[in-house]
């Protein structure tokens, strides 16, 4: 069996704000799909209403991804070919605890500074956890999705 290519997809009320938060959190890059979008618009294969301007370039209105800066990407579409997170607009709000979450690992001794940096980006501290197996901080992103900082 060959390995599978995958991406993590996160539902969002504001995918562009979420992409900005997570790109800043992880040191990822917001994908630039503007060349693909312009080609599709020119061909009449996508409606103008499906796009908007974000950071000075055309992007999809209802979805946007971030990718690891060291991973390859398709230059024609701007789509990452490695580690990436896609944020897609959904009409409903988050209603319960995540069944899947990210763990963000910091350099030794820098967790408190990282938590403060993430709070400045819009995250909130939910709980400090100290157990025999380790210590971490449970946080939520600007839309309430839980993640842990170790």
Image (tube, rainbow, N blue to C red):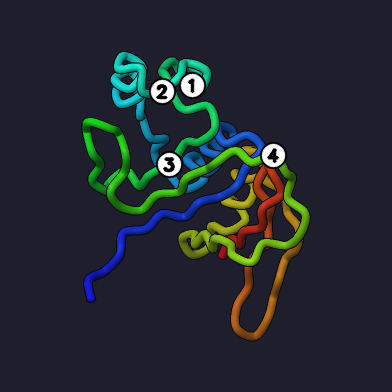
Q: Quadrant of residue 138?
A: bottom right
Badges 2 and 1: C-beta atoms under 8 Å apart? Answer: yes
Q: Nearer the viewer, mark 2 or mark 1?
A: 2
Q: How crowded is mark 2: few (under 14 residues within 10 Å), some or many (20 or more)?
A: some
* Callout 3: SS: strand
Say which residue label 2 marks: 46
- Location of the N terminus (image quadrant): bottom left
| Count of numbered badges drawn on the protein | 4
Q: Earlier in the sequence, mark 1 or mark 4?
A: 1
Q: Which of marks 4 and 3 is nearer the N terminus?
A: 3
Say which residue label 1 marks: 51
Q: Which of marks 2 and 1 is nearer the N terminus?
A: 2
Q: Which mark is residue 76?
A: none
Q: Which of marks 2 and 3 is nearer the N terminus?
A: 2
Say which residue label 3 marks: 66
- Separation (CA) of disc 4 from disc 2: 21 Å
Badges 4 and 3: C-beta atoms under 8 Å apart? Answer: no
Badges 4 and 2: C-beta atoms under 8 Å apart? Answer: no
Q: Earlier in the sequence, mark 1 or mark 3?
A: 1
Image location of residue 129, percent across then percent down: 71, 71
* Callout 1: SS: strand
Say which residue label 4 marks: 91
- Separation (CA) of disc 2 from disc 3: 22 Å
Which residue is painted at 59% across and 51% down in the image? 113
Which residue is painted at 50% across and 51% down in the image? 9
């Amino acid at each position: 069996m060959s390995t599978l290519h995958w991406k993590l997809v996160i539902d969002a009320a504001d995918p562009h704000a979420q992409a900005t938060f997570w790109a800043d959190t992880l040191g990822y890059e917001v994908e630039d799909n503007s060349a693909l979008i312009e080609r599709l618009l020119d061909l009449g294969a996508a409606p103008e209403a499906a796009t908007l301007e974000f950071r000075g370039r055309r992007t999809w209105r209802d979805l946007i991804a971030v990718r690891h800066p060291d991973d390859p990407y398709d230059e024609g579409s701007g789509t990452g070919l490695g580690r990436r997170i896609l944020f897609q607009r959904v009409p409903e709000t988050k209603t319960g605890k995540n069944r899947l979450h990210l763990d963000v690992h910091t350099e030794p001794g820098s967790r408190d500074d990282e938590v403060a940096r993430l709070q400045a980006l819009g995250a909130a501290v939910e709980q400090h956890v100290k157990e025999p197996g380790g210590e971490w901080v449970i946080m939520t992103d600007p839309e309430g999705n839980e993640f842990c900082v170790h």
